[in-house]
Every structure is written in structure tokens, then in C-alpha cells.
Image (spheres, rainbow, N blue to C red):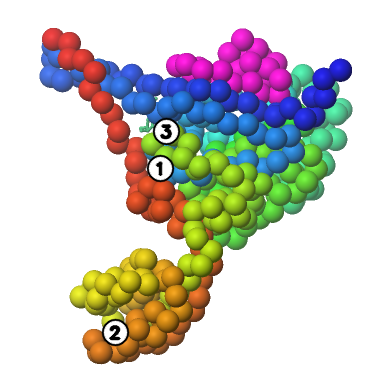
Amino acid sequence: MRNLSKEPIISVRNVYKTYIGKHRKGFFKTEYREVHALNNITLDVERGEIFTLLGPNGAGKTTLIKILTTLLFPSKGKAVVAGYDVIKEANQVRKVINAMLMGERSTYWKLSGRQNLEFFGALYYIEPRDIEEKIEYLAKELKIDDIIDRPVESYSSGQKYKLAFAKALINDPEILFLDEPTATLDPRSANEMRTLIKKTNRQGTTIFLTTHNMHEADELSDSIAILDLGEIIAIDSPQALKDQFLTEEMIHVDIKVDKPINGVIPKLQSLKEIVNASQKITSGKSEFPIVSLALTSDDAIISSLKILHDSGIRVLGMSTKQPTLEDVFLSLTGRTLSEDTSKREEVVSHVE
Ligand SMILES: Nc1ncnc2c1ncn2[C@@H]1O[C@H](COP(=O)(O)OP(=O)(O)OP(=O)(O)O)[C@@H](O)[C@H]1O
Ligand SMILES: [Mg+2]
């Protein structure tokens, strides 16, 4: 007999998605534009893991999650979710998965939390008695039991997210898909959401999530696929990604200085032991600029401090830093994760 537990719970093979948009140009002219949102995506997700798609705005994260949750057909390629083909066996897929794709907008605000969960439970043909038990359990777990009978419109944003999360657990899904589960939350609610995600995963649910927050990806994931311009450019555990792309001998130093050092950057970069020198100037008036250096030898720290001193710059503090997934993304693409990459249309035909 086949050992199913050893098989990936999600398997994506050579998936492409092209959107074709129609743009009116004046009265008689229509222009067709193609967006190659996904290009040849192949990946496996192991049963029981937290798998993260990390990528900037417009990378194609939502497109892939919609294909895996059967809301969108791929243009080409194959995806199998929990043993079922997302095109040919979409109904079976839907029974064993659930998703939080639109955060707080995925529930009915005029109804109470309980009425929402009863409604969504009924869609899965859960018996009324079982659904009440389930609601009690979820409301307690997510700490929304005191507000569960209030209309959702009176909930805070964090509470609406928790209800959406409860809704996504109503059918005990084998796989839970979460599209940017913390993007619009305040730091405290985002932290609570991450704790809930970890707890749900520990109880046996496989999690597939998307984010453009590298700290979140680092904290939560067993595996990360970095998606950029519709292509997977790296896939591994967070630590392996950091190890793979950043040589171990590299030292990363942050130096806090009393004023911007624009003209001094080329001088720092001319030192042969300095691989990269950049400065971060925050908009807050009370914060000082930070000079970030990546060095191959600690000798270069002293030379750098001398260059700053000779240029009349005062050093206010210094710390070494661990490489982050942002450094990985930067070294792979030359861009930061916060850059928007959603404008990538291609005109395919003009029709008069
Ligand atoms: N229905 C659509 N029609 C045309 N183009 C689309 C459509 N949906 C998405 N796109 C385009 O496809 C690309 C990928 O979009 P997608 O929403 O999957 O990215 P994303 O990684 O989820 O981005 P974000 O972080 O902003 O949510 C973008 O260039 C986007 O403009
Ligand atoms: Mg998206």
C-alpha cells in the first residue's frame, strides 16, 4: 500500500497564469493587455508544515493561492491539493481545505459572530448541534467568546480577523490557506494572529500563507518560497535561505551617525573589504541615520570608522546584525521587498 503521509499534501507542477485585460481606448479602439502573473511554478508542501510564499506587491501570491483554493483556473500546468486535482476534483478539494483570503471583509457585518459561524457551518452540512459545540470551542480558543453574540460591525479590526479565522476553521480543514493574514493589523493584533497560526499548525493543520513581511516569514515558516515577478527564485527553510545566499564570513554592522553621510558612501565602498555600504534615513526627526556595512574582514571596521571620523561624522553607536531574508531578497533581485511590482502588463493586440 502507498504511504500517503509521505506524499506532499500540495504539489504544483509547471503552473502558469496569464490574465488578459481589455482596455478601452476612445470610442472604437480596444487594446488587449496580458499579465504573466505566474510563470512555471513548481513546488511541494509537506503535510503538517507552515509553508510561506514571500514576495513583494504584484509578485503573484494571491493568484497562486486562488488557484490552489479552486477559485481560479491555471492557464497551464497541474496542481494537486490533499490528493485531489484542483481542476477536475475541485469539489473534493473544497471540502478538505479552508481559506482566509479577504481578512475582515469575509464575514457579514450585520450578523453576529455566532450567526456568521452558523451560516458558514451550514454550508459544510455540519449538524446544528455539532456546530454550536464547535462555535463554543473556537470562540474560547480565539478569545472572542465575550463578543460572539454582538453584530460584527461593532468588532475591532483584530476581532473581525479572529472571527474570519474561526470561520476558516469551521470544517476542520486539513489545509488552511491564509492570504496576508496580518497585513492590515496593528502590531499587537498581528502578533496574536501569528500565535493563533502557530497553535493551529501544532494541532495538525497544514498552513499555506502569503506575506511580504520577511520577519513574519522568518518567524512562522518551516519552508519559504520567494516569489518575484511570477517566478519562484528560491525555496528552502528560512535558515537555509540565509545560509545559502550570504557567505558565513560576512560581517554585518550598523553604525548610528549624527548626520547623513551621502558623500562618504563611495569612500567606504572603495575599501576592498567592504561588499556593500548603504545608509538608512528615517523620516522621524528624532531618529539618527544608520549606516549599514557588509564586510569581509573585521579590520575594515576600524578603517570605516576612520573614514567617518575624517569626514567630520560623529559615531553615536554601533551593533553587529544577523543577516535577514530582506538581505536574501536584495542579493537575488537587487530590489527590496517593499517595492511594488504589480505594473507588468504587456500590450498584445490593438483592435480597431
Ligand atoms: N483579474 C486580474 N486581471 C488582470 N491582472 C491581474 C488580475 N489579478 C491580478 N493581476 C495582476 O497579476 C499580477 C499578480 O497579482 P497578485 O494579486 O497575484 O499579486 P500579489 O503578490 O498577491 O500582490 P499583493 O501583495 O499586492 O497582494 C499583478 O501584476 C496584478 O496586477
Ligand atoms: Mg495579494
Counting residues from the N terminus, which is met first, the one under dot 2 or under dot 1? Answer: 1
Left/right of residue 299 with respect to residue 201 in the rendered view: left
Q: Position of residue 98 (x, y in %)?
A: 66, 30
**Mark 3, mark 1: which one is toward the viewer?**
3
Residue type at mark 1: give it: Asn
Please state the quadrant of the image where ligand 1 appears: top left
**Mark 2, mark 1: which one is toward the viewer?**
2
Q: Which mark is residue 57?
A: 1
Counting residues from the N terminus, which is met first, the one under dot 2 or under dot 3? Answer: 3
Give, as a single range, the part of the protein colored magenta: 71-93
Per the image, label 1 sits on a secondary structure element best described as: loop
Q: Which mark is residue 307?
A: 2
- In this view, the residue in front, 157 or 284, is 284
- Would you place residue 222 above or below residue 76 in this image? below
> Is disc 1's CB within 8 Å of ligand 1?
yes
Location of residue 31 by image quarter: top left
> Is disc 3's CB within 8 Å of ligand 1?
yes
Sort mark 3 into few (<14), some (14-19) or many (20+) by Cα contacts within 10 Å: many
Residue 172 visible here: yes
| Cα–Cα gap, marks 3 and 1 | 11 Å
